């Protein structure tokens, strides 16, 4: 499993990185970004992750989204974070799916009923996809938003999740 958190202590000894992913999923730019982030060089990590993310590396897309979300190495930018989380989520990255679920859930508080309904369905879809992969807290989020949904909305969310699920 690749660590997706960044070392806050610039003087800390760098931890050993163990990679346990499918062949072809990791590329050199992603690994360089990981080394930079673990070494507390956020700007270098952003640059390396962007190169890997632009080539379609889902882990790099997720990490770049987190850096935009947190303002690490770049100014915080919610729209850019969402863009990268969506790219990662659409490729099946459970972290990206959880983040997209959270973003859609916030949209479910929209003043227009139709916008709120659509946001609930999309949030449910993303939470469901992440939960199927066993991603931390995804099942809880899925259950919570499900309580605020009609049976038809949950059914539609499951249908949409099924369209993106592998297999």
Image (tube, rainbow, N blue to C red):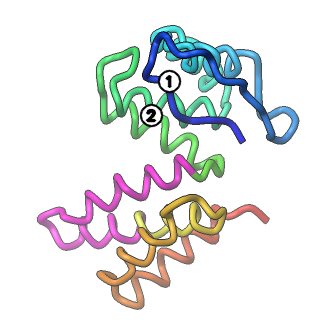
Of labels 2 and 1, earlier in sequence is: 1
Quarter of the image where one finds residue 158? bottom right
Give me the residue at 44% from left, 82% from top. Answer: 154
Magenta residue span: 95-122
Mark 2 falls on what kind of element?
A: helix
Q: Is residue 53 visible?
A: yes
Q: Residue at x 48, y 55 (%)?
A: 98
Q: Nearer the viewer, residue 36 or 95?
A: 36
**Residue beneath label 2, please?**
66
Q: Quadrant of the C terminus?
A: bottom right
Q: Judge whether residue 51 can be spotted in this image.
A: no
State left or right for residue 88 relative to residue 24.
left
Residue at 48 percent across and 35 percent down: it is: 84
**Residue 59 x/y as whole percent:** 63, 35
Q: Which mark is residue 26?
A: none
Position of 111 relative to 25 (above/below): below
Q: Is residue 146 left or right of residue 33?
A: left
Q: How many marks?
A: 2
On screen, 140 above or below 16? below
| Image position, residue 88 (x, y; %) | 58, 42
Instruction: Give the image quarter of residue 102.
Output: bottom left
Relative to 58, is 103 on the left or the right?
Answer: left
Task: Name the residue furthest left.
Answer: 111
Residue extending furthest toward the right: 23
Say whether residue 158 is magenta: no
Residue found at x 43% / y 78%: 143
Distance of label 2 from label 1 (alpha carbons)? 13 Å
As drawn, 21 above or below 47? below
In which quadrant is the N terminus drawn? top right
- Mark 1: which secondary structure? loop
* Residue 116 is inside the magenta segment: yes
Residue at image mark 1: 7
């Amino acid at each position: 499993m690749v660590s997706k958190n960044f070392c806050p202590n610039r003087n800390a000894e760098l931890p050993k990185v163990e990679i346990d992913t499918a062949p072809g999923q990791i590329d050199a730019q992603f690994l360089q970004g990981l080394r930079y982030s673990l070494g507390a060089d956020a700007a270098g990590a952003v640059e390396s992750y962007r190169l890997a993310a632009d080539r379609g590396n889902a882990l790099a897309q997720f990490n770049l989204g987190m850096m935009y979300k947190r303002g690490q190495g770049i100014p915080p930018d919610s729209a850019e974070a969402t863009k990268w989380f969506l790219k990662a989520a659409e490729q099946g990255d459970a972290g990206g799916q959880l983040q997209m679920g959270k973003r859609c859930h916030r949209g479910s508080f929209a003043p227009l009923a139709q916008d709120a309904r659509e946001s609930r369905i999309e949030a449910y879809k993303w939470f469901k996809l992440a939960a199927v992969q066993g991603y931390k807290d995804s099942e809880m989020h899925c259950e919570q938003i499900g309580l605020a949904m009609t049976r038809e909305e949950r059914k539609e969310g499951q249908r949409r999740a099924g369209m993106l699920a592998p297999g």
